[in-house]
Image (spheres, rainbow, N blue to C red):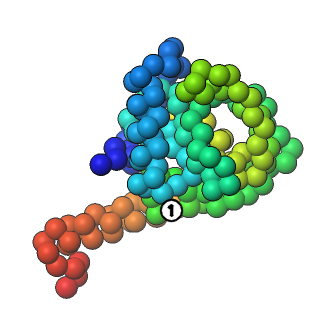
């Protein structure tokens, strides 16, 4: 069974992650757990803090490229001149999305689990996913990029969705459907 992904408002999602000192068996196992959790949940990326591990480790899994686990990733460059909007969601806030403006081109430096330093330029969706997961390493959630009014609306919607989901689970637990 895949490790559960932390849901907002879990306070651990707001803690900055610590750098990984050594790529050892524990870190490689955590990489495998990220892969398993993301495959179970369905998504494009996941960060170790979303599994309750305050370490700088992320997984990117885009349809057009093989999965990529990055250790201690650092944003080297972002093209803030060319920010574009995109409806963004998060596995830690399931059921809600909001239009977030992010740079369309990034340069990221990191290490692989094979202890090779890599530098990668990405654009479009790949850049967005990298930025989203890098934010998780700093305790930032996608709604932090919204203005106060949009953030408040999104969080109210998230509360409603969460309540509805909880009520649905409770109804299933009694062997019947909610409201019947």
**Residue at position x 47%, y 34% in the image:** 31
Q: Nearer the viewer, residue 18 or 45?
A: 45
Which quadrant of the structure image shows residue 122?
A: top right
Which quadrant of the structure image shows residue 74?
A: top right
Q: Residue placed farthest to the right in the image?
A: 81
Please give left or right for residue 75 compared with residue 92 in the image.
right
Q: Position of residue 94 (x, y in %)?
A: 45, 58
Residue occupied by mark 1: 96
Please give left or right for residue 109 compared with residue 160 in the image.
right
Which quadrant of the structure image shows residue 107?
A: top right
Q: Give the vertical position of 35 relative to 98 (above or below).
A: above
Q: Residue placed farthest to the top in the image?
A: 21
Mark 1 Cα shell of 10 Å, populated few (<14), some (14-19), many (≥20): some
Q: Nearer the viewer, residue 114 or 137?
A: 114
**Residue at position x 74%, y 29% in the image:** 119
In this rendering, does residue 156 appear at all?
no
**Residue at position x 45%, y 19% in the image:** 24
Q: Give the vertical position of 32 relative to 169 (above or below).
A: above
Q: Residue placed farthest to the left in the image?
A: 174
Please give left or right for residue 101 compared with residue 69 in the image.
right
Q: Position of residue 110 (x, y in %)?
A: 65, 26
Q: Give the quadrant of the C terminus.
A: bottom left
Q: Position of residue 139 (x, y in %)?
A: 52, 34
Q: Position of residue 19 (x, y in %)?
A: 53, 20
Q: Nearer the viewer, residue 150 or 180?
A: 180
In this rendering, does residue 61 appear at all?
yes
Q: Give the vertical position of 111 relative to 107 (above or below).
A: above
Q: Give the vertical position of 62 relative to 105 (above or below).
A: below
Please give the count of numbered marks on the rendered protein. Answer: 1
**Residue at position x 41%, y 47% in the image:** 37
């Amino acid at each position: 069974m895949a490790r559960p992904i932390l849901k907002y408002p879990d306070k651990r999602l707001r803690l900055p992650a610590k750098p990984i000192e050594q790529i050892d068996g524990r870190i490689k196992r955590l990489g495998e757990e990220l892969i398993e959790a993301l495959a179970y949940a369905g998504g494009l990326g996941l960060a170790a803090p979303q599994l309750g591990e305050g370490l700088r480790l992320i997984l990117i899994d885009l349809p057009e490229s093989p999965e990529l686990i990055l250790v201690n990733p650092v944003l080297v460059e972002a093209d803030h001149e060319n920010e574009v909007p995109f409806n963004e969601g998060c596995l830690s806030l399931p059921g809600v999305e909001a239009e977030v403006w992010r740079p369309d081109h990034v340069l990221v430096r990191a290490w692989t689990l094979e202890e090779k330093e890599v530098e990668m330029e990405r654009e479009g969706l790949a850049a967005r996913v990298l930025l989203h997961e890098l934010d998780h390493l700093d305790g930032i959630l996608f709604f932090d990029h919204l203005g106060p009014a949009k953030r408040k609306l999104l969080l109210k919607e998230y509360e409603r969705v969460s309540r509805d989901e909880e009520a649905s689970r409770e109804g299933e637990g009694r062997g019947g459907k909610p409201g019947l």
